[in-house]
């Protein structure tokens, strides 16, 4: 059994440093011009500083370039990828083949992690992208534990699984909130994360689905947070390479605490797997104490079948 990487997102330079100090082995950042649902917008100068701060602390720095790209996005893409390559980022997270094609031309040694959301559901497709240059694949959050284990057994690249945080359940390139406000006769403001907008279901008004807009369109997020803490031993036994905490729309204090708990969980499970169940129960209580009251912790699809 090998110890997996613990990865977390960061919305600012301060948060990046603090989650690394709390136990993260790697941090994922980006800018909404090229990355989907990034926690914060990092300019190239800030990314350069982030690389230096991460490497100074023996951590890795990944940059998301996984937006749905259109023709007009391709003009600046070569220069952006080349800049990331030259500043020595540890990997670029991509979903669009245009990133692979462009990287081959301007940044041939740039490591690539494939994250195409719901498309990463079988090992043959993952291995296809591995042969095209990807070194890691982020698995779809809709997979159960059996599918995850089977993919890992057949994968030719590293495998990453989200273990904590909210997930996206709907994405549209349209500015749905702004258009709705204009329909109501309102001016239509910026529907960013800070507005704390949400939608509910008619028969389940207790569930709140956060919604925000950025330059990539409208995003509706899950009403619950994934928390696989109690099942971490199964992922370690399967030798999953990277475990991701998605801290989008959470404050820094929350993310620091969650990283700290998962750091201790991974270390404890690795050192004494037979007693992990008891340790996990105690650590879960720590997360429950800081968990927002309106967001239930769930194991997601880990033990159920997704029907598309």
Image: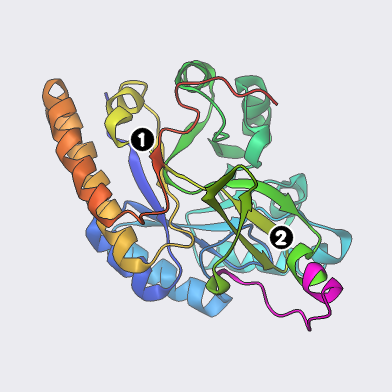
- The residue that appears at 56% across and 61% down in the rendered structure is 38
Name the residue: 54% across, 35% down: 141
Residue 258, x across and y down, in percent? 29, 52
Separation of marks 1 and 2 at Cα, in angstroms: 27 Å
Establish if 80 lies above or below 131.
below
205 left or right, relative to 2: right
Residue at the image point whose x is 53% and y is 74% from the top: 194
Q: In this image, 80 relative to 8: left or right?
A: right
Q: Quadrant of residue 169?
A: top right
In the visual, does 56 lie left or right of 89?
Answer: left
Residue 238 sits in quarter: top left
Q: Main secondary structure of the magenta part?
A: loop
Q: Position of residue 195 (x, y in %)?
A: 57, 73
The label on residue 218 is 2
Residue 254 location in percent, x, y? 31, 61
Q: How many marks?
A: 2
Q: How is the image coloured?
A: rainbow
User: Which quadrant of the figure contains the C terminus?
Assistant: top right
| Along the line of sight, the residue nearer the viewer: 68 or 278 | 278
* Residue 109 in sight from this viewpoint: no
Question: Is residue 156 something one can see in this rendering?
Answer: yes
Q: In front here: 242 or 57? A: 242
Circle 1/circle 2 CB separation < 8 Å: no
- For the N terminus, the image quarter is top left
Q: What label sits on residue 228 in the rendered view?
A: 1
| Residue 183 falls inside the magenta stretch | yes
Q: Earlier in the sequence, mark 1 or mark 2?
A: 2
Position of 223 with respect to 250 (left or right) is right
Which portion, as a residue range, is magenta?
Answer: 180-193
């Amino acid at each position: 059994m090998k110890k997996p990487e613990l990865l977390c997102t960061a919305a600012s330079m301060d948060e990046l440093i603090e989650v690394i100090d709390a136990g993260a082995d790697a941090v994922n950042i980006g800018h909404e011009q090229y990355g989907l649902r990034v926690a914060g917008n990092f300019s190239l100068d800030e990314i350069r500083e982030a690389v230096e701060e991460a490497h100074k602390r023996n951590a890795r720095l990944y940059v998301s370039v996984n937006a749905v790209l259109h023709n007009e996005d391709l003009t600046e893409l070569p220069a952006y990828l080349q800049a990331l390559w030259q500043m020595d980022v540890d990997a670029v997270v991509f979903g669009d083949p245009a990133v692979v094609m462009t990287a081959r031309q301007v940044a041939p040694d740039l490591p690539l992690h494939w994250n195409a959301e719901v498309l990463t559901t079988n090992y043959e497709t993952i291995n296809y992208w591995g042969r095209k240059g990807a070194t890691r694949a982020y698995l779809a959050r809709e997979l159960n534990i059996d599918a995850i284990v089977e993919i890992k057994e057949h994968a030719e690249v590293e495998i990453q699984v989200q273990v904590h945080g909210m997930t996206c359940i709907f994405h549209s390139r349209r500015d749905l909130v702004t258009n709705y406000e204009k329909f109501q006769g309102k001016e239509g403001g910026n529907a960013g994360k800070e507005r704390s907008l949400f939608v509910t279901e008619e028969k389940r008004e207790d569930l709140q689905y956060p919604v925000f807009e950025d330059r990539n369109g409208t995003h509706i997020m899950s009403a619950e947070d994934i928390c696989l803490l109690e099942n971490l031993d199964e992922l370690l036994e399967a030798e999953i390479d990277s475990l991701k905490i998605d801290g989008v729309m959470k404050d820094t204090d929350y993310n620091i605490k969650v990283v700290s708990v998962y750091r201790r969980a991974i270390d404890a499970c690795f050192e004494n797997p037979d007693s992990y169940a008891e340790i996990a129960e105690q650590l879960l209580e720590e997360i429950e104490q800081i968990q927002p009251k309106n967001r239930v912790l769930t194991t997601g699809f880990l033990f159920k079948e997704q029907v598309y």
